[in-house]
Image (tube, coloured by chain):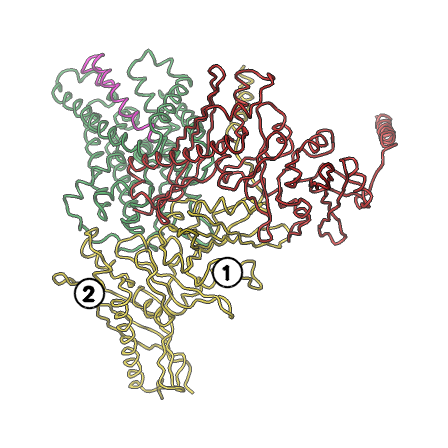
Chain colours: A yellow, B green, C red
Amino acid sequence: MKKYKNFIFIIILIIFVVYLRAGEERMENIEELEIAVGIGYSVKEDVGGGIKYMLPINSVVYQENGVNVSTVRTGTASTIALTRGERQRKSDRKFFLGTERLYIIDEGIGRFGVTNTIDTLFRNPMVNDDGFCVICKGKSEEYLKYKIPGYDTPVDYITGMIRNAPSYNFFQKNYRIKDVYLMVGSEGRSLALPYIELNEKGVQITGMAIFNKDKLAAILDIEDSKTMNILRSDRGKGMLTIQGNERDFISYYAKCKRKVKCNKEGDKYKFIIDLKFNGDVVNNVMYKKLSSKVEVKEKFEKDMEKKIEARCYEFIDKMKSQHKADCLELGRIAVAKYGRETGVDWDDVISNSDIKVNVKVKVEKVGRGEY
Amino acid sequence: MNDRKGLITANELTCLLIGILIDINITMTPNSVVAISKQDGWISMALGAVYPLYVALIAIYVSRKFPNDNILVLSKRYFGSFIGNVLNFLFFISFFSYFPPAYFNATLILRTYIIPFMSPFKVYLVITLIGAYTAYKGLKVLARIGIISFFLLIVIMLVSLAILFYGSILNVMPIFGVGAKDIIYGSKNTIYDYALFEWIFLLYPFINDKNKIKDSAFKAIAFCCFVYTWVVFIAIYYLGIDMIKKTIWGFFSATESIRVDVITSFRYVFVFIWVLIALKSISYSYYICIDILRNINKNLNKKLNSIFVFIIMGSIVIFITKVYYPNRLVKDEIVNFTTKASTIYNLFFITLIAVIIIIKKDDKCEKI
Amino acid sequence: MNKKKYFIIIAVVIIYTIISLGTEKISLEDLGIITGIGYDMKKVSPTEKKYIFPFSVYDFETSGKRSSHISVGEGRNVGETIETRQKQMNKTILQGLERTFVIGEVFAENGLKPILDERARNYQTSDMAFGAICKGKSEEILGMNIEGYGSSSEFIAGLIERQQGYNFFSQNYKVIDMLVRIDAEGRNLVMPYIDVQEGKIEIVGLAIFKKDKMIATTDLYTAKILNLLREDNVKGVLSYQKKPKEYTDIYVTSKRKVKCEKKQDKYTFTIDLKLTGNIASNTLYKDILTNLKDKEEYEKLMSKKVQDNCNEFLNKMKNEYKTDCLELGREAAAKYGRRKGIDWNEIVCNSEIKVNVKVIVNEQGRGDFIK
């Protein structure tokens, strides 16, 4: 009996393993799978006043011969989870989730409210939390179907755009879905995502979309987006220009640091935002002798400070009166000082608070010479 | 389970104690503490270490008096065979009450994140076989597994340092903003995590150097307190209390934020490590339950040495888990009750023994 | 030793030659490998029917690219179709590798007996091919050119196979399933119903058969309920929706048990459906994550909704279809005896059918965003 102990043990092990695997779906080869790379979210008005969710999903079939086939399949149904079945009935391959890189939410869903979308993604452990999230003009399906030469799918191109955006315009690196959860779900925070458009030139980032809780509040053009990014984030990089008239301008590429102080007097909140810019002049046909005379440099710095301050105040006024949302995430600072879950509506409070901006500009280098 | 030669070293004792305190439930600790203490949850978590500290102090006292007798032997000696066994059996029940939740937690995390297609029963079966077989091999083996788990925990802690890059200190502020009252009140949610330190009462007879018991106990508590506090802190730091409330496994969600370009997803690395830690806890639970039963009645000793006992116990546990803990919400309600009951009983039991020893100091203490 | 070797070699050669005598060998280029078979019928006159059987045959080109063409055989009976087809073809037909067979509507309405007989006799055909009923003519669907596929049959086979796991479809749509379900006592056949929408082939519902004649087709919504009542261990999404934005979806696996009772001549069937799964999306209940009452309320409401849907379907089945499409007769026959000449369709439609649905939430994913 002892001789056979190992043998019996192996037999039992095999039976056990077979039992565990029995009845389960067979494993697929990667060539048989449709691997999701980008998911779009849209809404459609339904007959009878209802709403249908449309989820176009861009997936790639990776083939042995290296030619990768990219398809877009759309499922349309009354809830997001039901779109899965609707999409599958047009597909002949098994669907694979977990490596998708892009979530495109279109304006329609933005106005409708993104809670449903986020909840479905949040619950699903198979979802890739590192995927980028953007808001698009029009319908998300167009972007996923758009063919860009040299790319298997437009998703690669768009994610590349978002990934490289932080070099300019003070864009941030936190536009991934895991950041979206935090921005929508935390007290004192608000959601802001890049806004892309599809026109004759192709796909471009044309601004930022800001949200009031879970609904789209406004779409900012690129200039306002820059200002908002400067006021909103702790760090950023971008180009600032003073344009005198047609021929006179000076461009300044700077890194920006932000510090916020918060005070409360009675029921009114006061915020002081200190912005420090540190950068180089990259192009100058306006300030003569900038690189040689200290006074000229200081004048430029002062002028730049004034210009930035003016822009900031202009934007803050718009924010308070038009958008009525705390898109600068000032609530977060207040909460850290004055306590959480006190029932305060931070959008309301910030719109009625006193916000002061102090800007300091410093020019480090002016290049090799002046023309 | 031949432990006669198997004396354990002080380090092994420390790792065993750490092992019984820290199991896969640590991924859920931020969620339980943040409910009341909000952003100061990590302070509550640190304060909760008072409970195992008390247990340790009592254990050190008792072990100094009777370094070779575990608490079950002592209870029989002081209270007679019958009452002693009753007390011991209740002690067994209080340990056993942590067994099904451990099964359930481990299975749920595995099924949610990696193997959603497996039915719970199949996962229970696999856990049982591995856990039971490991426990069957004896204390020395469990100690070695404890050392491995200890290092795995260190790996997790070191990697989680990376989360510091992604979160914000604002989330943890205002510090002490919740108020001392709520912070202390919130500590009561930490009981589940610091529970079962009473195992030290069964372990100290096996240590090879009786003087090191104190060191081992304190080292274990210090390490666990640090780990737990860090876990809660880092979860709040990255997620913020609003998000923690939306998740089921807060620490797990926090670790998903770590991005290293080479590794596509840290999740699978982590789950692999958590699986090993969960299996360790299960095998410890098996060992303890059977060990207590063995001590209750020496006659059962011979029969209990065979692997069939493990199979029977495994079947009972699987049965109970399947029937009485069908889902997370029911399990939470049951666990709330059993944790309180079990903690109160354990504290009562060990204090009773200590008091009795003090009272009867002059009587039978020469019996070695 | 050497003699033995030589002897074996010689023996092998001789045996091989003998065996291959009299067998014909055909080179690959002369083979027509069938990838899909279609079955169509045209009513030339009230008494005369014409059978049209298109074969989808692979073309092997020297460039290595796969494509296919349709070879049609027409005739008044099956044998004639084979002959007429061979007249057009320049190759010998190789069966056994076909992936799909598509049956046109008209043919299905007239009865599948001719196919069954042919399939059962033909030892060369593949029993594992997937089948579907199509709207219109199978010739069109089989002849469709789909980019990236050698023939549309490949696509259709994948389409049908991959429905498993969505909309509660099973995989029992192969030839062998068809054979079993048409003639066995108490059993009933349903097949996927496909159509071409916007140039793409999709599954649009199920086709219900009475014996071997198709009597009705359903849309996808009804198909889901039919599958749920009919199959065991199938998966799909169920949704309870109050408003466009407020709904809770659950992805379930089903367990189906049927009990049959007979009182005098009246039969009662009880179908117990246990649906366990995890919540895919929730924006309806604020506290479903931690509150037992919320979870139980959802389970109750969801169960009731499914139960109502099932009862609605049962009415339709009894009054409109008048067929036992749930294969309840099978359970009754197993309990009360077979081969008694009972018409199960009739009995089941006159019996009482009760459905008990229980929805159980097992897991909830990673968390709940709506809190």
Residues at circles 2 and 1 in contact by the CB criterion of under 8 Å: no
Residue found at the far front of this picture? C46
Q: Is residue B179 magenta?
A: no
Q: Is residue B355 visible?
A: yes
Q: Chain of mark 2?
A: A
Q: Pick the residue in front: C142 or A276.
A: C142
What percent of the width, then of the height, locates residue B6?
36, 24
A238 lies above or below B164: below
Give the amino acid at mark 1: Glu
Q: Secondary structure at mark 1?
A: helix
What percent of the width, then of the height, locates residue B187?
20, 39
What percent of the width, then of the height, locates residue A231?
29, 67
Tally of marks: 2
Which residues are drawn in magenta?
Answer: B72-101
Task: Identify residue for label 2.
Answer: A353
Q: Which of the 4 image quarters holds residue C99?
A: top right
Task: Identify residue for label 1.
Answer: A142
Q: Secondary structure at mark 2?
A: loop
